[in-house]
Image (spheres, grey):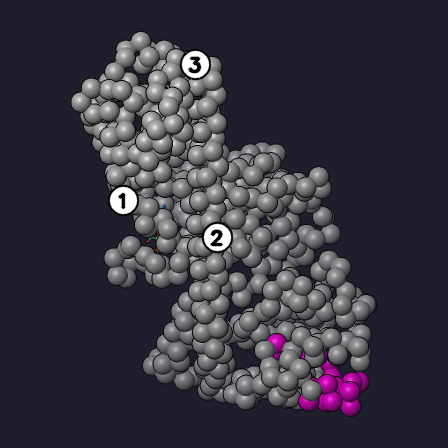
Amino acid sequence: MTEKTDQEKKAHILVVDDDEIIRIAASESLTEAGFQVTEAENGIQALQVLEDIRPDIILLDVMMPEMDGFATARAVRQRAGFEMIPILIMTALDDLESINRAYEAGATDFITKPINWVILVQRVRYMTRSVQIMNAQKRLQAELQQAQKLEAVATLVGGLAHDFNNLLHVILSSAELIQLNHPNLDRPSGGLGDITEAVDRGSKLVRQLLTYSRKIKSEKRPIHLNDRVQQVTQLLQRTIPKMIEIECRLNEDLNWVSADSIQMEQVLMNLAINAKDAMPNGGRLVIETANVEGSENVGLPPSTPDSLGWVRLTVSDNGHGMEKETRRQVFEPFFSTKAPGKGTGLGLSMVHGIIQNHDGKIVCRSTPGQGTAFHIYLPAVEIAQENARPAEKQNRVGGNEILLLVDDDETTLNTGKKQLEKAGYTVITATDGEKALKIYNAQKDAIDLILLDLMMPGMGGANCLQALLRLDPEVKVIITSGHYPEGQRLQIIEECARACLHKPDPSSRLLAAIRNVLDANASAAPSSATSTESPRPNRASDAA
Ligand SMILES: Nc1ncnc2c1ncn2[C@@H]1O[C@H](COP(=O)(O)OP(=O)(O)OP(=O)(O)O)[C@@H](O)[C@H]1O
Ligand SMILES: [Mg+2]
């Protein structure tokens, strides 16, 4: 679906005058200046024209038979949707009383006859420009309000999902423990499989909510979006009905972006599936990438001399499109127009959360009956070779080292301890940061690794992490949290910890991360607790 910006569209002028010579002169001057013109011979005809078109400006004569310009202006103003349309009165009456009457009737400005057509064209240009600026401001204001609303919902959803996540973590760990203790229980009817399957479904839902509320970390590294598009397109070719044609228009010189590849694929999949759903009788799905420099009329922050601009990813379709009211709500969690059971309404809220997490912007343009386009903007970055993803290691799981497990939730602590002991580790537990510090201070030489929750009463996990690093700059800490802060606090945590995991990650992932960190080269330890250098190559989460 191609759309034109306000500037690209020809502004449409309705010229209302009973004098044919004036109408012709106005049409010629305005058409030559690049405007689209519709003519009406009198007020009644003008009101009929407004049934079918919505001009950007009305040029209105005053002295006309049947319905004069004052009455026409009043009638136009009373029409829904035309309350703000600029009306430029063309009048031979230059007395103050007539001018006041024109304003009272709803005129925006006036120009006196005989008309200087050069001045008229300039006046119309000025008015259309003002309207464009006003419309852009209104749109940005509406977007800001929407963004604030989404932010408030995200905070609420994030809090609920976090608590729910902790419950799932306990259920999953307990099920895994039972399975370990009774390996034959689940075959054929132990029900444990059902529990893990339900937890898996529950955690997918929670993950979507956490992604929406931006509590899920994005593993960002320089990537080439074209690769992700090609990857997803291959999958789509196999899964999307054949009557939908998929077209990729990829810019070969596309700039790099710093992004989480898996999340970018999720974004593409969600948008493509929505596009497919919008084209039940077939159609065309277009995925496009481009480098963008200006603000693109969508309120992108202006580029600075150092910035490399933006990379735009567009997913568009020529499906049934959306009404304004639907378009307004698309990013809200649980908003869906699909039949019950067909959609949870979380796809686009997740996409929105991911793009926010990447300091990007997503814009939806849609016209009922014509189609929809989602434009995503991500900041372009320089490629840094050292950030390339290290090859995944196949490590053994389990070991006989000593681990300190820190979590304020007793159930999590107990199930975690049992799980780690099953894998051969010796586990010491602490219920808050203060106790963890005391234990580590006393047994520094014995403890090989610390598993630290972030959200705890007292000093909390982040402060504990920094205090641990002050005690021992070589300390190995893995953060296991269902909830991560944002901005600089997150950056510090990522710099200081050897790995950051999410609850409820399956135990296999936790065990792999522990092994990775324990086996990693000790020389790669952080040099200071507040280092803000780029991620260290030994982070287990990179490889796990
Ligand atoms: N390409 C599109 N064309 C038309 N309508 C769309 C398009 N994409 C999204 N929508 C509208 O936005 C709504 C929300 O989309 P979203 O992806 O968040 O949820 P969903 O597709 O309904 O459910 P799911 O959670 O399975 O993704 C959709 O129900 C649909 O009304
Ligand atoms: Mg969807």
Sooner in the amino-acid sequence: mark 2 or mark 3: 3
- x, y percentage for residue 281? 26, 40
The answer to whether residue 321 is visible is yes
Instruction: Tell me whether circle 1 and circle 2 mark residues in contact (CB < 8 Å).
Output: no
Q: In the image, what residue occupies the spot 49% across and 67% down?
A: 155
Identity, as a three-letter code, of the amino acid under mark 2? Leu
Callout 3: SS: helix
Span colored in magenta: 435-454
The answer to whether residue 426 is visible is no
| Residue 438 colored in magenta in the image | yes
Identity, as a three-letter code, of the amino acid under mark 1? Pro
Q: Kindly identify which numbered label has been placed on residue 144.
A: 2
Q: CA distance from mark 2 to mark 3?
A: 40 Å
Q: In the image, what residue occupies the spot 63% across and 69% down?
A: 500
Q: CA distance from mark 1 to mark 2?
A: 33 Å
- The residue mark sitting in front, 2 or 3, is 3
Query: Is 94 placed left or right of 484 in the picture?
Result: left
Callout 1: SS: loop
Residue under numbered circle 1? 280
Query: Is 275 placed left or right of 144 in the picture?
Result: left
Residue under numbered circle 3? 117
Is 164 drawn above or below residue 121 in the view shown?
Answer: below
Q: Kindly identify which numbered label has been placed on residue 263.
A: none
Instruction: Decide if ligand 1 comes within 8 Å of the CB at mark 3.
Output: no
Q: In the image, what residue occupies the spot 41% across and 33% down?
A: 3
